[in-house]
Amino acid sequence: MKRIPLDPWIAARIGGPERLLQRDALQAWQLARLRETVTIARDKSRWYRRHLQNAPVEPRSLDDLTAFPFSSADDIRQEPMQLLCVSQDQINRVVTLETSGTTGSPKRLYFTRDDQELTIDFFNVGMSTFTDPGDRVLILLPCQTPGSVGDLLATALLRLGAIPIKHGVVSDPAVVVEILQSERVDVVVGIPVQLLAMARCQREPAPRLKSVLFATDYASDAIRQLVQKTWHCEAYDHYGMTEMGLGGGVECDARYGYHLREADMLFEVIDPATGVAAPDGDYGEVVFTTLTRRGMPLIRYRTGDISRFIPGQCPCGSCLKRLDRITHRINGVVVLTGQLAQSRVGDSDTQITMARLDEAVFSVAGVIDYSASMSRPGNLDHLQLDAQVSSSNFKQGAEKVRESLTVAVQSVLRSNQNSAAPVPCSIEVQVIPFIAPLRRPAKRAIVDQRLAREFDQFPG
């Protein structure tokens, strides 16, 4: 098994010996860059001068980072311009992340040309894990706008010697399936649910792809297995968010955790309730600090994502930290309150997330997409599941699909309880045939109609 290409890339950046990345050399680089970031933030940003007034003047070690306060999405929403550390004419790209609620202010992220170059470099090296010069790569991400994720990826692929095919997000999966054949595609980069829809629409004989990269959202095992089986390929996963500059980590050939972009960011996993560092192997909230970004540096930014550091060295031999797949977002947990209206959250309550539903729902043959919502019309929680299924599966037996989905959802609701116990809420499943176009890409979540909640939409 080859070592992930991030290792020699980072070793070269930090001036290490030959192509072998050493952990102590990386940590020395991180500390130097952290000191630079703190100094620049204090000197150039009024918000950071105020925010860091009780923090150490300079971190003496990486452990000193815990003495610095956290930053959050609310800070970006409320005072985005105050976080800038360069003049506005140096900003090359502004990304606005809207919210789905009626009262939430958008988040605006600012990037210089150099900030975007760092992302292109990461995309270039990360893609080389499973892409070779000459490969034809279909990009199914937003790519029309200069500086968008797909546009930066296309630039990175050109530098790799690959051939980018910029398509954009999938509207009609059947049309894109035809493109796989007509363009002789080797590698596909796209959104997991959209790739699932394409796999469901694929007719035999299916093309043999070299690899697929999931990006922007959680990819369930059910989706990964179907994609690999349909196109006879290996599927990899990428972790990133706009606040990170779009790239955070990528899987190696072992496909057991994201190798992190540690030359550009310092990652932590904390107990979300106390803010204390979680031991390796324990789940907590992912926090990161940018080390090389100059437009809008972020110090101890709380992502809201729940994951863990995987203990031990990766089978590929890399010394980079590995982050496990994201299990859910903190604000994406829906708690079933039980049959009694006066019941409260406790050990017997069941928590469900979109990721857990994905594993169950997408294992049912023919399901292309679904939405889920939770309400409480009386004394019992009520889960509504609206599923779109392929036309062939719908014609063959919509009722059978509905029954299979009901059983699948029941298994999720019972997972924290005795298997013989009653399901702690009522379930209603509706099945309709899929008709293009697919829904606009968005951060997928269970809509909790019992509470007022907001979820960030995927940036276009």
Image (spheres, rainbow, N blue to C red):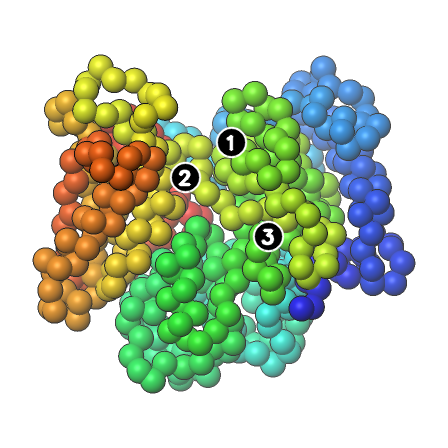
Amino acid type at circle 2 is: Asp
Residue drawn 41% across the image and 75% down it: 231
Residue 217 image offset from top left, x and y in percent: 44, 51
Q: Is residue 19 left or right of residue 291?
A: right
Residue 50 image offset from top left, x and y in percent: 67, 18
Q: Is residue 35 above or below residue 200?
A: above
Q: Is residue 337 above or below residue 84?
A: above
Instruction: Report the front residue among 28 and 101.
Output: 28
Answer yes or no: do the residues labelled 1 and 2 have beta carbons within 8 Å? yes
Residue drawn 56% across the image and 67% down it: 154
Q: Is residue 435 left or right of residue 327?
A: left
In which quarter of the view is residue 57 placed?
top right
Q: Which mark is residue 73?
A: 1
The residue that disc 3 covers is: 258
Q: Is residue 456 above or below residue 226?
A: above
The residue that disc 2 covers is: 456
Residue 276 shows in this picture: yes
What secondary structure is marked by label 1?
A: helix
Amino acid type at circle 3 is: Tyr
Q: Which one is closest to the eye, mark 1 or mark 3?
A: 3
Q: Which mark is residue 102?
A: none
Q: CA distance from mark 2 to mark 3?
A: 23 Å
Residue 416 image offset from top left, x and y in percent: 34, 35
What secondary structure is marked by label 2?
A: loop
Amino acid type at circle 1 is: Ala
In which quarter of the view is residue 397 placed?
bottom left
Crowd rating for badge 3 (residues with CA inside 10 Å; few <14, some 14–19, many 20+): many
The tag earlier along the polypeptide, 2 or 3, is: 3
Q: CA distance from mark 1 to mark 2?
A: 10 Å
Answer yes or no: do the residues labelled 1 and 3 have beta carbons within 8 Å? no
Residue 76 image offset from top left, x and y in percent: 54, 31
